[in-house]
Image (cartoon, helix red, strand yellow):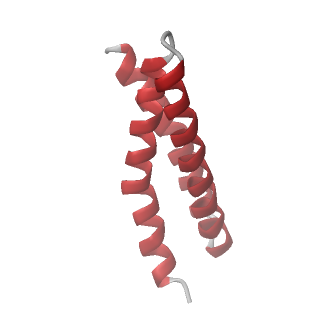
């Protein structure tokens, strides 16, 4: 497996698995998972852009962070949004 794919899978797997465990604990866990993913996406995006622009040796990690932020926004936040729409 290529190093870029390994970095991407680690950067996606860790926050999404933590958010999944949090979401399984009930309504408060779902809200906590949504907040966690919002903060992770913002941090991944900012750090990824900084690494991609200013750090030549870590540019690949920066690109993986930005891509992971986009995937988490697409999959994780939309899933949490659907779950939150059903919470009364």
Number of labels in the image equals: 0
Question: Can you name the residue that lies furthest to the left here?
Answer: 1
Question: Percent x, y for residue 68?
Answer: 43, 39
Give the image quarter of residue 37: bottom right
- Say whether residue 24 is visible: no
Question: Can you name the residue that lies furthest to the top here?
Answer: 57
Residue at the spot 42% in from the left edge and 29% down from the top edge: 64
Vertical relation: 1 (above or below) 69: above
Name the residue nearer the viewer: 45 or 38.
Answer: 45
Vertical relation: 31 (above or below) 64: below
Question: Percent x, y for residue 44?
Answer: 54, 40
Residue at the spot 46% in from the left edge and 81% down from the top edge: 85
Question: Percent x, y for residue 47?
Answer: 58, 34
Quadrant showing the N terminus: top left
Q: Describe residue 21's horizontal placement relative to residue 9 as left or right.
A: right
Question: Can you name the residue that lies furthest to the bottom here?
Answer: 88
Question: Can you name the residue that lies furthest to the front here?
Answer: 54
Quadrant showing the C terminus: bottom right
- Say whether residue 33 is visible: yes
Residue at the spot 51% in from the left edge and 47% down from the top edge: 16
Name the residue nearer the viewer: 24 or 75.
Answer: 75
Question: Percent x, y for residue 46?
Answer: 56, 40
């Amino acid at each position: 497996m290529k190093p870029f794919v390994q970095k991407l899978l680690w950067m996606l797997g860790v926050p999404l698995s933590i958010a999944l465990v949090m979401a399984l604990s009930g309504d408060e866990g779902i809200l906590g998972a949504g907040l966690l993913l919002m903060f992770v996406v913002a941090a991944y995006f900012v750090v990824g852009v900084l690494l991609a622009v200013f750090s030549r040796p870590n540019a690949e990690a920066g690109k993986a962070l930005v891509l992971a932020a986009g995937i988490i926004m697409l999959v994780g936040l939309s899933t949490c949004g659907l779950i939150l729409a059903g919470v009364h």
